[in-house]
Image (spheres, grey):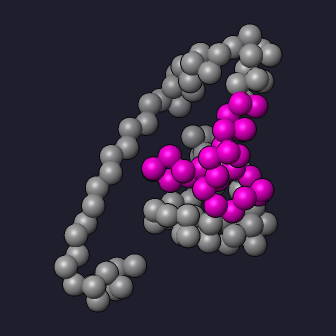
Amino acid sequence: LAQKEGMRFEETLTGFKWICNKKFDLQQEGYKVLLAFEESIGFCCGDLVNDKDGVCAAAVFAEMANQLYAQNLTVSSHMTTLYNTYGHFISRQGYVVVPDPSLTVTIF
């Protein structure tokens, strides 16, 4: 989606420590970060709060729903349009158990 719309996508380790550090690095490079998120449905919208913020995310969602309503659209119909434009995305979580802590440090 980001590539198709001419935007940049960065992947980090899970956790807002990593996500917001990458967000800060991108901002230092002159990028405006619109959205940062993790698989556990944590969202960081814009520049107001540099952490997972459900209140801000809910406000952004409500504003989007209001904009869609003004166009006589629903969130559901908008999702259908997004699926038709970009396709469906399915993700799956996985874990790696590393019994040796020194190896974990080497990996990350």
Query: Furthest-top residue in view?
Result: 72
User: Which residue occupies the foreground of this view, 40 or 10?
Assistant: 40
> Is 54 in the magenta?
yes
> Which of the image's four quarters has the N terminus?
top right
Relative placement, left or right, of 43 versus 68 is left
* Above/below status of 75 relative to 97: above
State which quadrant residue 2 falls in: top right
User: Which residue occupies the foreground of this view, 77 or 62?
Assistant: 62
Could you tell me which residue is drawn at 72 percent across and 38 percent down?
59
Could you tell me which residue is drawn at 45 percent across and 50 percent down?
39
Relative placement, left or right, of 38 versus 36 is left
Rendering coords of residue 36 (x, y %):
61, 54
Rendering coords of residue 3 (x, y %):
59, 46
* Above/below status of 36 relative to 18: above
Q: Magenta residues?
A: 37-63
Answer whether residue 50 is visible to the viewer in this image: yes
